[in-house]
Amino acid sequence: MAFLRFQLLALLCLTGALEVFVRSPQKAQVGSDVLLQCTFSVTSPPVDPKFLAILWRYKDDIILRYDTKGLAHHPRVSFNGREAKTGNASISVANISLRDGGIYKCTVIYSPQTKNEEIALEILVPPVIRIPNKVATKGEHKTLLCSATGFHPSIINITWMRDGDKVLTDSQLGKTQRNDDGSYSVNSTVTIMPDSNHKNQSFTCRVHHDALHDPLEESFQLVYKDAKWNRIIVICGAVILVMIGVILFIFISRKLKNLRKAPGRFKLNDIKWPEKLVDGEEIILYCIGSNCAENTQVTWLEQRGSDEPEIIRPSSGQVEEEEALLDRSYEICDNREGFRSYSSRLRFIFSLEKHKGVKFICRFTSDNETLEKHFHCKPVYAKPSLVDRVKTSLCVSGEILYSLRLDGLYPRDIQILWTCVTGERQEIISSEEQLVEYSPLTFSVCSEARITEKVFTDPTCKVRVTWEHGSMDQPQSREMSILDPDFRWTPVVEAIQTPRLFHGSPIDLECKISEYFPDALTVNWLIIKDGSEEETSLPENMFHMKSKRESDLTYSCSTILTDLPSLETHQGVEYICRVQHPSMKTHIETRTGKLRVMAKPHPVEPIEMTLGDNSRVQFYLNLQGFYPKDIEITWDSEDGKYRYLLSPTNTVTRGKDQTFNVSSVCAVLGPLFINPQYRISVQWKHESLDVPEVRSWTWRDLPWRPLMEDIIIPELEAGKEAALTCKFSGYFPDSPSVRWIKKEKGNETEVKLPTDDYKVLYSKSNEATDKTFTQVARLIFNPHLERDQGAEFICRVTHPTLEEPIEKRTGPLLTEYMKKPQISDITPTQDGMFELKVDGFYPGDIDISWIQRAESSGDQWQTLNPYSGNIRRNTDGTCSMTSVCEYYGGNKDKEKYILMAIVKHKSLESPEQKTLRLESDNGKLKPERKLLPFL
Ligand SMILES: *[C@@H]1O[C@H](CO)[C@@H](O)[C@H](O)[C@H]1NC(C)=O
Ligand SMILES: *[C@@H]1O[C@H](CO)[C@@H](O)[C@H](O)[C@H]1NC(C)=O
Ligand SMILES: *[C@@H]1O[C@H](CO)[C@@H](O)[C@H](O)[C@H]1NC(C)=O
Ligand SMILES: *[C@@H]1O[C@H](CO)[C@@H](O)[C@H](O)[C@H]1NC(C)=O
Ligand SMILES: *[C@@H]1O[C@H](CO)[C@@H](O)[C@H](O)[C@H]1NC(C)=O
C-alpha cells in the first residue's frame, strides 16, 4: 500500500506539474525594448537547474537556448539565468524592428516534461504623412492628396478638414499598399471646388493610428496659381523624363548582354567561419559559390577522424523541441545571392564534445561539377562557468579563505589573479590553483587565496578575482568586500536579559555578540534616562569586554555593564548596547526597554507581639524601604479545619530615599492558641518579590514561655508539716501543666507521689502588668526520715510554648539530718540494776558507757559493762534505746559512790553525762538522800 502511494506521488510529481504562463498578444513600438513574459511553475520548487532547459523560438530560429551546458542567445536577446531558477523564463528583445513581429514560442523543459506557449508580438510603427501638392489652379477642381507611409499595422483612419474643424465627408481612402519592409502606405484624397474668390483656404489632414498616442495632422494654406505656366512646366517635365528613360534603357540592356555573353567559371570560396568556436554558442559556416548553374546542389558533410564523411541532414522544424535542443541540430539555409551566385549557411550550436576534431565539408555540385571546401573545427573553446559564487571560509590561522571554482573550461590554460584593492592601491595576493578534469573533455579549476584578518578591518578594502580565458572576449571578475550583503560574518547581537533593578543593589547587564569576523568590534553602552531623548554614553570603566574565538572560527564577545541603580536617578532608565563592526555600514544595537527600579520590603525582625486587653495577642509587622508604594498584606488564621481572614490595620509612611514603610497590626484572641493546630500567618506581596513572603505562628512560636524560680525549701523537720514551693511565671496562654515528682535516694526512677502523704496546692494569677500568667504549686507533706531521707523533689512544668518540659529540683533532702537524744536520769530499777533511757535521736548510732567510783577513792573511775538494749524505731523515724547497768558497790558500809552514764551521739557537740550518787546501806546501794537545804 505504501509503495503504491509512493508511486502515485511520484507520478503526480512528474506529470501535470509543469505550467507555463505567457502574456499574449503583446505590442511594441519600433525601436523600443520589449519584455516577452513567460513564467513557469513546478510542483516541488525550488527548480533544480539540472533538469531545466529553456528555449525561445522565433519563426524557425532558435533565439535563445539555456540548459545545463549554458546559455546561447541572439545578441539582441537578453535573459537572466538567476531569474530562470525562480521560474521566470522571460526574455527581453532590444531595439525592436518591424521584422520582429510575429509569433514567439517559449518552451520550458523540466525533464521529462515539456511545455510550450506562444506569444504574438505586434509591432507598432507610426505613419509619416506628406501632402505633396498644396497648389490649386484658379477655376479648376482640385484633388488634394494626403499620403501616409511606413506604418504598421495596416488599419488607419484619415480625415480631412477645412478651416480647422469642418470635416470633409467625401474623402476617399485609397488601397493600402504593403511596402518591402513590411510596413504599409495609403493615400487619402478629397476633391474640392476652389473658393470663388480664390481666397486662400486652410486644410488639415488628420491621421489616427494605433502607433500614435495623439492623432497626427498636417495643415496647410491652399495657394491658387494661374493656369498657363503650370501646363508649360508639366509638358517640359514630361519631355525630359522620357529622354532620361530612353538613355537608361539603352545603357542597361547593353550591360545585360555583356553578362550573358561571359558566364565565367564555377568557383567555390573558402568556408567562412567565426574566429573561435565556443561550446554552446551558435556557429554559422558560410559557403559561397559563384557562377553556379541553375541546378546547383549543396551538401554539407561532417567527418570524424578518419571515418567516412556523413551527410548532414538538417533537423526539420517538426522535431521534438527537446531533442532538437539537447541533441545536435543543424540548420541549413541555401540562398541565391544575386546573379548566379549561391550561398549556403550551416547553422548549429557548437558542442565541444560533439564537434571537437570534426571536419565540416561543404560540397557544391553544379552542372555535374563538384567542388568541396573543408573546415576543421579549430580553435575550440569551452567557457569557464563560475560555480556558485566565490566561497569564503575561515581558517584556523585567522585568515579568510576565498575559493573560486570555474567549471567546464577548455583548453586548460587560464589565468586567475587575486588582488586586494584599497582605493587606488592594488596588491597581488598569492593564490593556489588546482586543476581537475571535469568531464572527459573540459577542466575545472579551483583557486584559493588567503587574506589576513587585518586587511578586513579596513572596510574600504576589496578583494578582486579576475580570470581570463581564450574563450572569453574579455576578462571576468568578481569583487568581494566586507560590506557585501552576503558577507557571512557580520555580528549578531543577542537580546539583553531584561534585569530587575533594585534600589542600591549592583546590577550586571550582559550583551552577547557572536558570529563575527574579523575581531574588530566596538561596543558602547548608552543610557537613556526617563523622559529624555538624549543618549548618554557610559564611561568605559563601567563595563568590560571579553572576546574569544569560537569553534567555528568566528569571534564572540561578551560585555558586562555594572551599574548601581537608585530610585532617584534610574527610574525608567533604558540601557543600549551598541555594536559597530567593519562589516556593517551602520551600527546594530539591543535595548533593554524602559526599566523600573524597585526596592524590596524588609521586615523588622523578630516580628513583635504583645499581649493586650481581653487576652488578645497583637502582632506588629513592620516592612521597610520598599518601592513602589503598592503592597498587599494578608493576615489569616486557621484552626485545622477552617481559615479565617483577619483584618489588620495598615499604616503606610514615607521612608528614606523615596521608599515606603508599612506597619500592619493584627490582633487575635489569645485563648485560640490553646488549640495546637491554631496558626496565624501573614503574607506580603510586592512587585519586587518573586514570591510572596510569609510568616506564621503557632503556640510554639509565642514568646511567652514560663520561667521557673528555684524551689523554696523550708527548714525540714521529721514529722513536722512542711511545704515546698514551686513558682513559674511570664507565660501565655494559660495552659501550663505542672507535676511534682520524687526521686528516692539511690534510685534514679521517678516515683509518683501517693496523694495520701503528699498534697499539692495550686494558686494562679495573671496580675502581671504584661498580662502574662504566674502560678505557684506547693507540695505539702510531713517529712519522714525513712521515706524521705535523701529523696529529691522535682517540679516539672510543660507549656505549649515549650518543646521540652522545664523543671527545678530540690536536690537530695534530709541527708545530714540529726536529732539530739532526750536522755532520762539514771533510775534504779531493782536491786543493783540501773537504767538510762535515750529517746528521739537520729541517726541510730549511739554510744552509752557507764563508769563508777567510790567517793573516797578520789578520781579513780572504773568502767562498767552495761546491757544495752536494741535500738527501737519511732513512727517519725527517730530512735530510742534503754541502757541497763548492774552495779553493787563495795564492801564498806556507809560508803558513798558515784555512778555515771556517758552518752555520745553525732548530734551532740560533747558527750552528755548523767550521774547518780549512791550510798551503801546494809549491803545494798541506795540513791543518796539529799539533804534538803532547809533541813
Ligand atoms: C522576469 O525577469 C525579467 C528580467 O529578465 C524581469 O524584468 C521581469 O520583471 C521578471 N518577471 C517576473 C514576473 O518576475
Ligand atoms: C536599432 O536598429 C536599427 C535598424 O533596425 C539600427 O539602425 C539602429 O542603430 C539600432 N539602434 C541601436 C541602439 O542599436
Ligand atoms: C499615392 O500617390 C502617389 C502620387 O500619386 C503615388 O506615387 C503612390 O504610389 C500612391 N500610393 C498608394 C499607396 O496608392
Ligand atoms: C494667397 O497666397 C499667395 C501665396 O502666399 C499670395 O500671393 C496671395 O496674395 C494670397 N491670396 C489671398 C487672397 O490671401
Ligand atoms: C477609425 O474609424 C473607425 C470609425 O470611425 C473607428 O471605429 C476606428 O476605431 C478608427 N480607427 C483608428 C485606428 O482610429
Image (spheres, helix red, strand yellow):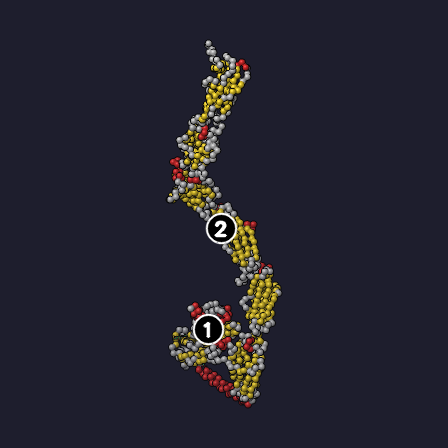
- Number of numbered discs visible in the structure rendering: 2
Is residue 213 visible in the rendered image? The answer is no
Q: Residue at x 52, y 77 (%)?
A: 328
Task: Find disc 2 in the rendering and name its residue.
Answer: 499
Label 2: few (<14), some or many (≥20) within 10 Å? few
Name the mark nearer the viewer: 2 or 1.
1
- The spot of residue 924 in percent (x, y) is 48, 15
Residue type pointed to by label 2: Pro
Label 1: few (<14), some or many (≥20) within 10 Å? some
Instruction: Name the element at disc 1.
Output: strand
**Seen from this angle, which residue lies furthest bottom?**
261
State yes or no: Cβ of the residue under disc 1 lies below 8 Å from any atom of ligand 1.
no
- The spot of residue 821 in percent (x, y) is 47, 23
Question: Which of the two labelled residues, at mark 2 and mark 1, occupies the earlier sequence position?
Answer: 1
Cα–Cα span, label 2 and label 1: 60 Å
- Is disc 2 in contact with disc 1, using a CB cutoff of under 8 Å? no
Is residue 932 visible in the rendered image? The answer is yes
Instruction: Name the element at disc 2.
Output: loop
Task: Find disc 1 in the rendering and name its residue.
Answer: 113
- The spot of residue 289 in percent (x, y) is 55, 84
Residue type pointed to by label 1: Gln
Q: Residue at x 54, y 53 (%)?
A: 559
- The spot of residue 39 in percent (x, y) is 46, 70
The quarter of the rendered structure image containing the N terminus is bottom left
Does residue 421 sit above or below 562 in this rendering?
A: below
Q: Residue 151 falls in which quadrant of the image?
A: bottom left
741 with respect to 259 (left or right): left
